[in-house]
Image (cartoon, rainbow, N blue to C red):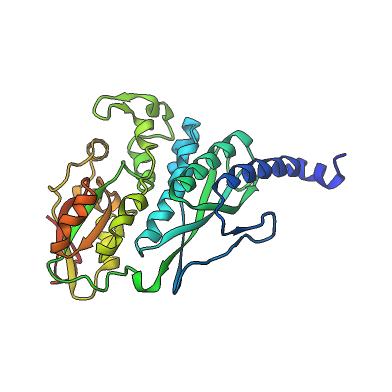
Amino acid sequence: MESTTEKAYVRAGVDISLANKVKKAIAQQARTTSRPEVIGSGFFGSMFELKGYREPVLVSSTDGVGTKLRIASLLKKNDTVGMDIVNHCVNDILCCGAAPLFFLDYIAMERLVPGQIEAIVSGIVRACRETGCSLIGGETADMPGIYSQGNYDLVGFIVGVVEKRNIIDGSSIALDDVILGLPSSGLHTNGYSLVRKVFNVDANPSCLNEFDATLGRSLGEELLQVHSCYYPQIKPVLPLAKGIAHITGGGFVGNVPRILPQGLAARIDKHSWSILPIFKLIQEKGDIEEAEMYHVFNMGIGMAVVSSPEKVGKIIGVLPQAKVIGKIIKREGEKRVLLD
């Protein structure tokens, strides 16, 4: 029988019984990602037994999907953003050389919508399974008065591990080292506030369903392309990498300097790869200067790997999709990334 407290919560816009049902459904999906190191479930904290390492260093990161969620909500397709958040977080810790261990999510909306949450979690679970990462906990929250109807927030938290001797921090990067780029699938999870403004998405959501010949699909399908996960690709060549930069918000200018030692800069050849059609479309539609495009978007390169010149051939042999896109140069002046 429903308690007086539960009835009061329902009147306030929070359905405790529904929330419990949703959490049970999530737990069932999460169990499919379990690793042997996961201990128990249903506690106030999730437990993971770390073993098999000599000098383990834990690497953690947290991030959100941003306003790409608005596109997913409008199109009623929410599984891909679940994959986005996992892949984004996995890529971030990969930059230190870390392998993913476990993941936690946070989903908040005005009122819990079971179908929507199930789709989100299905994407999270799929991405976790593909990277061998366990979904060991999280939170779903009814927050009436904070979120508007149909909108939600999605945040992820990841923990990975790397042997101390294998940490990749860019400190060994030297003059004339080579920068290789791995292709992105599109915007990934950055620049969507600008994109929504350029295409006037909020006022005219129907534009998302319009087929675009230059894209070969609808605008909405293009904008929901899943954020590429680079861990399976880069893992075999980690010993050959001196530095790895995830090209997210801020583009090359905002991310490559994070791995560069003092006194060094990066020269990027913008003509060394083909710009994806979506970026050309955004630039033309929004009348955006090229410099701003490279500062906001990844422009078709989702991850940059720095190695010594003699190891480039080995890396490309394992990663034929990788392209040489630049080199390390001596820093002169304030700029740490030069786009030629």
Expressed as whole percent of the image width and height from the top left, the position of residue 33 reads 54, 48
Residue depicted at x 34% and y 41%: 195
Q: Nearer the viewer, residue 185 or 129?
A: 129
Furthest residue to the front?
52
Instruction: Please state if 164 lies on the left or on the right of 28 as rendered.
Output: left
Residue depicted at x 35% and y 45%: 228
Instruction: Please state if 300 lies on the left or on the right of 129 as rendered.
Output: left
Expressed as whole percent of the image width and height from the top left, the position of residue 148 reads 58, 41
Residue 208 visible, this orientation: yes
Q: Which of 233 and 68 is in front in this view?
A: 233
Residue depicted at x 52% and y 67%: 51
Tell me if residue 70 comes above or below residue 95 in the rendering. above
Instruction: Please state if 301 lies on the left or on the right of 26 as rendered.
Output: left
Expressed as whole percent of the image width and height from the top left, the position of residue 171 reads 27, 73
Residue depicted at x 14% and y 70%: 175
Quadrant into which the N terminus falls: top right
